[in-house]
Amino acid sequence: MSGQATPEAALERGRSAYADRAWTDAYESLRSADASTPLPPDDLELLATAAYMLGRDDEWVATHERVHRVHLESERLDQAARSAIWIGFSFALRGEVGPASGWFGRAQRLVESVAGDCVERGFLLIPQALALIEAHDWDPAATAAAEATAIAEHFGSRDLFALAVLTQGQALTLGQRVGEGLPLLDEAMVVVTTEDLSPVIAGVVYCALILTCQEIFEVQRAREWTFALDRWWRQQPDLIAFTGRCLVHRAEILQLGGSWPDALEEARRAARRFGETNNRAAGLALYREAELLRVQGELEAAENGYRAASGAGWDAQPGLAQLRLAQGAADAAAAAIRRAAEEASASSRRAQLLPAYVEIMLAVGDTDAAANACAELEELASQYDSAMLHAVAAYERGTVDLAQDDPRAALDSLRRALAGWQALAAPYEVARTRVATARACRLLDDNDAWTLELEAAWASFRRLGATADAAVTERLLAGEDEPDPHGLSARELEVLRLLAAGKTNRDIAAELVISEHTVARHVQNIFAKLRLSSRAAATAFAFEHDLV
């Protein structure tokens, strides 16, 4: 055996590497020791964890099955139940509901056979609470998680306490009891950053916390905990688990903060990682990559990205509808975003869709629909009490006010939006808000403010790499406000062409799927911009200038 470590030396090396979070070394050493002499349950659990952290989920399951059998043979039913629970969690995290349910059911029967109480009963409350959250049954979910928290405190289980407090916080915040839930999420993160938790539990808590913060639009906390997760990753250079979806969340945070090249690289890393592990959430990474390409003006590459995301089973809206608008296909954008909004029922999903809905409805001239969506968005912002949603809602309200020719009201909303985006350190959103602010100032004949706001926005777009936005802003600075030389918007041109074809307001409303009130307002705008006074004069103008 010269040159080869003895089984005892390999075991000690594996234990030491595990303590150092050197997962590859821990896995190889423990597996070598196990090949010579089957490891006892405690060391098998170390091997299972090392395998999991390296993305070897199947080995995690197979090793815990061995641990489960050993405990059953020794009639340690509580420990056998614990192994069954870990296996169930693994299948649940992979979205394999049937196997997860089967293992949780086995664990439940074993716990019921244990004389007296045991901590495993608390662990089994977690999947129950998560299933209730999935069903939007928030209060029972919070109650089950609170019971698990009490069991964790009774048995002094740090792992269970972190999971239980996290789950209770999720149930409350997602159920829009944000004020009650956020302190629990913070407490869970304090536990994961200061206590010695199981590496798997630590990773689950990190990622679940960030995901929850994203879902309730709690951007500042998501940013803080993303940076904490990044530090945790750096301590484990060969870590593979928890580096897929969490990378996407990191990309979202980087995008909001203006670090677009880094965000794009993280999204692509996530897509590669999902591919390596055959994770069905690959579409999320592909969608984030497409979003980054779209805002950078790479429209063809973005379209390919949205198609790839859809092919992977991810809903490509609202990004794809926004892409269609950028491509000049306003009607296609409107049809897509209307369909997506009609299908969306969950508050968080509607909050994701409504900003794009407002933007697209304004582009096609349906101000009434945009105003209604804006009101709903303001209500959602109040429900979540989210700084980000308040900023979004204020910006959208400002754009609606502009469309309704109320620049003073628009300025009030846009100033609030600007303060919100500046507080969130979101440079792209700040620049977009400054463009809208410039438009309001020009309507109030403040040309100096118009120029200063646009210059600041243009500089930001250039720094970010938002080429399309920079080009539009540059044209505005050059006095080329509208793409049509006659000053008509794309929707107004559509109305003019139909008017010149002899259509009535009712006919136009039916063809463009907008209200007659909106058509009448467009007609008034056309008359004002072209300095005309009748439909006959507008028809003559359209033919004289080859607009039909």
Image: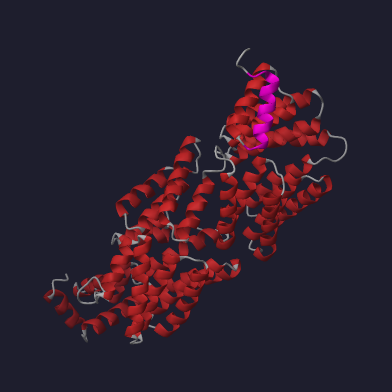
Q: Residue at x 65, y 45 (%)?
A: 202
| Left or right position of 301 against 357 | left
Q: How many labels does the image show?
A: 0
Name the dominant secondary structure of the magenta segment. helix
Seen in the picture, residue 191 relative to 520 is either above or below; the reply is above
Magenta stretch, residue numbers: 5-21
Residue 253: x and y in percent read: 50, 57
- Across and down, in percent, residue 120 comes to 77, 40
Residue 138 in sight in this render:
no
Rendered position, 318 above or below 107:
below
The stretch drawn in magenta includes residue 369: no
Residue 190 lies left or right of residue 459; in this view the side is right
Q: Residue at x 71, y 53 (%)?
A: 165
Asked if residue 548 is positioned above or below residue 450 in the image, the reply reads above
Residue 277: x percent and y percent?
51, 36
- The quarter of the image holding the N terminus is top right
Most distant residue in the top direction: 1
Residue situated in front as seen by the camera: 265 or 88: 265
